[in-house]
Image (cartoon, rainbow, N blue to C red):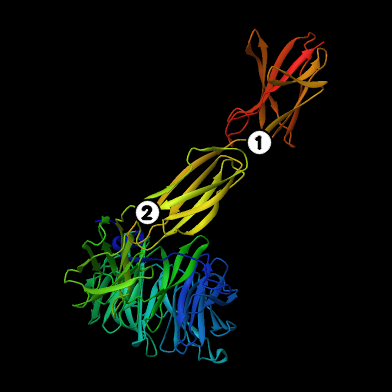
Amino acid sequence: MRSTSIATALAVVLGSAALSVGAAGTASAVPVTVGSNGGIVVDAALGRVFVGNDTDDSVVAADYNGNRVDSVSGIDGVFDLAVSDDGATLYAAARSSHEIVALDAATLDVKARYPVTTSIGPLYLEVAAGKVWFTYQNDDGKADLGSVDPALDPAGGDPVTLGLFPQDQDHSLIAGAARLDTDPSEPGLLAFGTSDYYSGDGIKDLMAVLDVSGAAPRLTAWRGDDHPMYHVNDIDLVPGTAQVLVDGTERHAYADGAFSAAGSYPSGRSADIAPNGLVAQWDEEKVAVYRPDTTVPVRTYAGYVADAAWAPDSSRLFALVSAPAGYQLRVLTDPALSVPALTVAAPASAPRAKKLTVTGKLTASVPFAAGTRLAVTRTDLESPDGKALAAVTVGADGTYSFADTPPAGGTVTYRVSFAGDAGHTAASGSDKVAVSRAATGLSVNNNGKLYNYGTDVKFTAHLGTTYKNRSVKLYADPFGADKPKKLVKTGKVDSHGNIAAWVDMTRDTAVTAVFDGDARYAPKTVKATAYARVKVSTAVSKHYRTAKIGSTSYYWFHKNTDPVLTTSMTYYQGRKYRLDLQVYYQGRWYTTDAEYFALGSNGRSAVRLGAPGESGIRARMRAVYVNGSSGDSVNSTTYGAWKYLYFSN
């Protein structure tokens, strides 16, 4: 069984989709990036996502695709955001300037600023019962609750009210930055939770549910520091049930003014709950989406998340994901759909026209309906666009198998696809099989033959039996890096299986014949190497006559005259030639010298031979190109004709 792809393997291990930060979809789309998290809230009425950027004291607006559409600066120490019930007003907590700023959600123009006279805050915001509720820390560091009544005319009184958390001897506050949450299905309720990490008695926790629908908040449920919990860093009201979710993990039911454990999700750090009850829980590694009261996530997105918020229709999740410049807004689509892992395992190799078996498995965190079907496609040389095979049914354990007889050889790919359903995204996987093909004969002539420079030589390739493809390509590759391999002929062979091309042999040349193969016969390549001499000649000057000695013609020189021998040779960069000198003595020729001389760029070189100063001497000379020793290896060794010299008085 072989791995089908890295992507499938990762899906099996992580069961997730990666929260990678990438480029925008179009040239005009600009993703939202913030240096540090200053809150995130979704406005359904405008189809906008608002993100606070504490790094530059701004609020950025994005569309539902995560692309930047507007921004406003001057929100000093932006800490959290909330939006009015009608979506018309955006509220920002500016903790450094100690105020709540009301912005027109459509334009981001400032509508009002509400000062909050406290040393720390305002901090966290929620809108409930027509008011903006916020937490802060009073002068002794204890958490408290305040509100802004936007309907109140400042001329008639201060819209900001502090010290609204109901306190008595049994219900006292602790130090810390309290979190808030509301639930659209319970518009009069407000969840409140905090932890005091610096208490001398250890960590103290406080959580409460408040009814804020009346003139003053009333405690619906309370749990104080005499019942330490799990460090209340986050609290959420659970839609449709009298529960709160603490730190995205522990569920607590509230009744008769008290809290009791009601179950948990696997360990997390924070959460946001969609109106339909889906829980998005995140920590330093991932976002996991759970259906209510379950322990196996429907879907998991890998990546560090600082904050997240659901779209009010539960259709998507907006997350601030760690990026090189801070955090980038990412849109997580289909959060309610489980992502299946689909594996495909085929044999590594198989004979053509013989039955083989492909197996695999479809798995997901959400079970599949009985009788789930998978589409199967085979792609091969006969069906390069793919051929649909019979669909296969997944077994109760998620496994499947099917048999097939591949009609074509070569690489055969089996792709198995799941179309998706109401609970799952689509998935697919594939695996490849090397299906055998028969071998055919292919040859090319003239291998090892030697030709004179410039000879036009006919190279013929012969192709044996094949299935459908009768085409052959012929390439000529002259020796030397300056001349590339070149296609000199392509086409179908004749009725005898032959195809030919003419090559001008100016260099040693490799001629390659290529058969690309077909559905039943494997590709094949053969090569023939033919060799070419250089063109070489030598001219003699300074002689006073030519005459024969015996049957050989000699150039005659006076004994004190220097002969000049001019060699012409096919030019190649850096080329040299060897000049051989022999002298005739007592009936034999003796080699006296062999020296290399550089060839000029015009392909010529003249050498002066010193005069012997005595008569009766016979000599001969020739120019030689030596493969490898003459500065290159693009031609075969070539010997020029001997030139005979005689020195007289």
Q: Could you tell me if residue 556 is visible in this image?
A: yes
Distance CA(mark 1)–CA(mark 2): 38 Å
260 left or right, relative to 469:
left
Front one among 504 and 480: 504
Q: What amino acid is at disc 1?
A: Lys
How crowded pointer 1 is (Cα within 10 Å; few <14, some 14-19, many 20+) is rated as some
Displayed quadrant of residue 249: bottom left
589 left or right, relative to 209:
right
Question: Is disc 2 placed on a helix, strand or loop?
Answer: loop
154 left or right, relative to 86:
right
Which residue is painted at 51% across and 38% down in the image?
449
- Res. 464 mark: 2
Which residue is painted at 41% across and 66% down in the image?
19
552 vs 326: above or below: above
Q: What amino acid is at disc 2?
A: Gly
How crowded pointer 2 is (Cα within 10 Å; few <14, some 14-19, many 20+) is rated as some
Labels 1 and 2: the sequence-earlier one: 2
Quarter of the image for the N terminus: give it: bottom left
Q: Could you tell me if residue 137 is visible in this image?
A: no
Residue found at the very far front of the displayed protein = 550
Front one among 453 and 523: 453
- Res. 535 mark: 1
Front one among 292 and 12: 12
Displayed quadrant of residue 509: top right
